[in-house]
Amino acid sequence: MGDPNVLEMVQEEERRASRGEHFFEVSEQDLNSRESSFLISEEPRFKKDEQSKDSIFFRDGIRQIDFVLSYVDDLKKEAELKAERRKEFEQNLRKTGLELEIEDKMNSEDGKTYFVKIHAPWEVLVTYAEVLGIKMPIKESDIPRADKIPFSCMLGPLKLPRNVKHPHAEYFTAQFTRHRQELFLIEDESSFFPSSSRNRIVYYILSRCPFGIEDGKKRFGIERLLNSHTYSSAFPLHDGQYWKPSEPPNPVNERYTLCQNWARFSYFYKEQPFNLIRDYYGEKIGIYFVFLGFYTEMLFFAAIVGLACFIYGLLSMHDNSSSTEICDPEIGGQIIMCPLCDVMCDYWRLNSTCWASKFSHLFDNESTVFFAIFMGIWVTLFLEFWKQRQARLEYEWDLVDFEEEQQQLQLRPEFEAMCTHRKVNAVTKEVEPYLPWCSRIPWYFLSGATVTLWMSLVIACMVAVIVYRLSVFATFASFMETEASLKHVRSFLTPHITTSLTGSCLNFIVILILNFFYERISAWITKMEIPRTHQEYESSLTLKMFLFQFVNFYSSCFYVAFFKGKFVGYPGKYTYLFNVWRSEECDPGGCLIELTTQLTIIMTGKQIFGNIKEAIYPLVLNWWRRRKARTNSEKLYSRWEQDHDLETFGSLGLFYEYLETVIQFGFVTLFVASFPLAPLLALLNNIIEIRVDAWKLTTQYRRPVAAKAHSIGVWQDILYGMAVLSVATNAFIVAFTSDMIPRLVYYYAYSKNAIQPMKGYVNNSLSIFLIADFPNHTVPSEKRDFTTCRYRDYRNPPDHEEKYFHSMQYWHVLAAKMTFIIIMEHVVFLMKFLLAWMIPDVPKDVAERIKREKLMTVKILHDFELNKLKENLRMNSSDFAKHLIIQENKVQLAKSAT
């Protein structure tokens, strides 16, 4: 499907680029003529104030700026070395065919910064488009767009204008070949390659261009020059201002179009212009927004079901027999509960938790089991349908035959700097830098030890919060009992709830602090591992950050869900933390309400803090940078200077966006049985998140270098792992954290009232303890007129021959819990596997379209080659006929002469 020499050319280009050489080199004579024509002289040939401040062209108004480098004079001892590097680097850039124009610092806004503007002429673009395998249009597609969906007429208000949703027609494409330029639909050379492809090509050259030999090694790449502060920045230009369309001769301002139709909060209900995002920012950023949008759409269905379950709990709250008995003065008011802490806590009546029991019913009711099973199916549908959406995206964006981006597989400058050995690559047969394992092992040990230490620190902080809760519980209990002003709130703001709220807020603050420091430490230890390529670096950082944030954000939820109240002991024989603090007990209604509180505070707090940080942080930084730099009038503030003063998106910008989304996915799936409103909160957050991300990327950040990607990468595997884990966690939450199974066991096995089967459940779930059996150092000092108190457990009464041992009902409940876990897991996993088997990874219509496009592309290429061959044959036959005529004329002349 292409020139047979292309593969050899690409391989040769890779070999030459690794040595700092290039195919497309300009002769010295041509270079000198270009320099004399384009480089600035001592006296500039133009007045800057006559050029539009939004111009994205060189001074001639013809050549478009594809990339910008900036630097300032260095007054330190390395100034000469950096100047020499820049001189060599820029000279080598010109040798590759790039054209440069330098803006003197006197023309810049701050009077300190030099700007190097780079333009890629047509010859460079066609050469490297072939090297990078960029696909370009060869014929308009005859396959209709698959835009028709059920009830599409009802979704009209959600749709974008067609020219925004589909800014370009659909085409059959083929990998660009410079020797077949007439095959491609080239109407205008200046606009044939989109700006994203142009800046990707220029960055490819910049990342491989040499700048000298240091320490006996050839040094190359813009990243190394940025790390050494030889250049202060390198970025492609935005199309223009985001608040107004561009003026001629500038091309269409896609940045303005994106801002108007995507980055506006008033458009929160609209679909996203994915094709325009891809055209402007590249496939890698585009696929992130496709994923975030698809995830948000799927959350809509989970949010509706979760809200329905919550409304069911709200409507049935007053009919709940358990909370009715607890609130009844004749039942709950007569039940004396054992003290919740030693000495300082007094006996208390069960009806003091009346409002807490009603509130607990909102999330711990019959719909809890249904919602847990539903979410197990939902997460499977989400991941399977995402695979289909991803396959459709690969077809629409020409990523079917995608190969890993070269920049991701390129050796990192830090790796080359640390390498003292060389070895032959088994694939390319080229000599490459090599770092022995013995040199890496110490850093891997350090990395593993650091991650383990920080995860242990998270556990230690969680234990510290538990100690805080244990320490202040008695204080809250005694204070709320004696303080007359709290009489009216005492019924619903119990010591349990108060301690849980303050502990959750404290835990959230600790999470943010630990996360702040670990982000910086993880980046440092990943660099110390000396990853070979950018891809290895990102994968290593992903593993560290996800493991830490998983422990950091979820450890407190796991504690409340699976450990709190499970190992308390019983009155007279409580378990103690560090032999000092008595273990925490759950509320008589169970620990589910505390898990809900913990989950709500951490999830909501993280989302609010994250959105405020993402919106305010770049805004303040950019304002301060502009305020510090601006010294001259507005009309001198050029396009490249405006972009230079914006915040840098960075190579890890998308990494943190994905990490944030995956952590939210964990909150939505891992503990959703305890909080059915979690999908609704995530939905509302993501609606805002999409517009915040769009706004900051369009208005507050420099334009990122376009990059290709055909999937969300390693994050998809992490989502699959969390989906499997969520089935187990929700089954255990329903079984061990909620009160659902004990109620069912009582209903079917122990209830003696046929008319009201749940009557007497509260009394049945509380065991009896003889006050005389309390150790002297734990019992309250005042004398009481009652001899027993109650506690939550299934144990034998004091008059039983095996007093305080677990009763038979305890084992029945435990057996029922384990049975439920096994049945629920098997049912959900069976449905997951069936759904995964029934839903194809690639939709049938997409598979047919791919086959159709491949067939048509082969046919077009075949017809082109055939026509070219016929034309060559006609030319050859015509030349042959002319040659015969000339020979015959010569023979005739010779005969006539004789």
Image (spheres, helix red, strand yellow):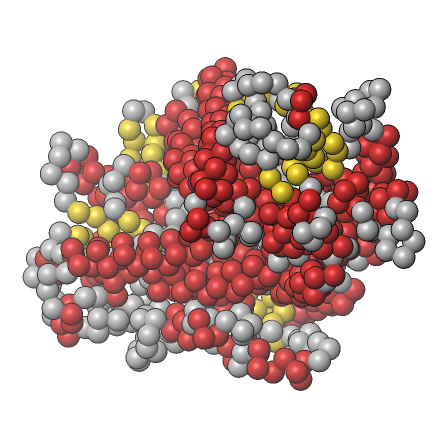
Q: Where does the image place residue 663, in percent across and percent down from the top left?
A: 55, 46
Q: Is residue 433 left or right of residue 644?
A: right
**Going 35% across and 42% down the picture, which residue do you hit?**
223
Q: Where does the image place residue 678, in percent across and percent down from the top left?
A: 60, 55
Extreme residue toward the left, this view: 43
**Going 17% across and 33% down the picture, which residue do you hit?**
78
Q: Quadrant of residue 225?
A: top left
Q: Where does the image place residue 602, in percent across and percent down from the top left?
A: 51, 47
Residue 558 vs 400, above or below: the answer is above
Which is more toward the observer, 143 or 289? 289
Q: Is residue 301 left or right of residue 495?
A: right
Residue 87 appears in the figure: yes
Q: Where does the image place residue 411, in percent across and percent down from the top left?
A: 45, 35
Q: Is residue 214 left or right of residue 193?
A: left
- Quarter of the image for the N terminus: give it: bottom right
Which is more toward the observer, 891 or 98? 98
Q: Total label count? A: 0
Residue 875 vs 417, above or below: the answer is below
Residue 717 appears in the figure: no
Extreme residue toward the top, this view: 438
**Going 66% across and 26% down the picture, which residue do you hit?**
771
Residue 329 vs 725, above or below: the answer is below
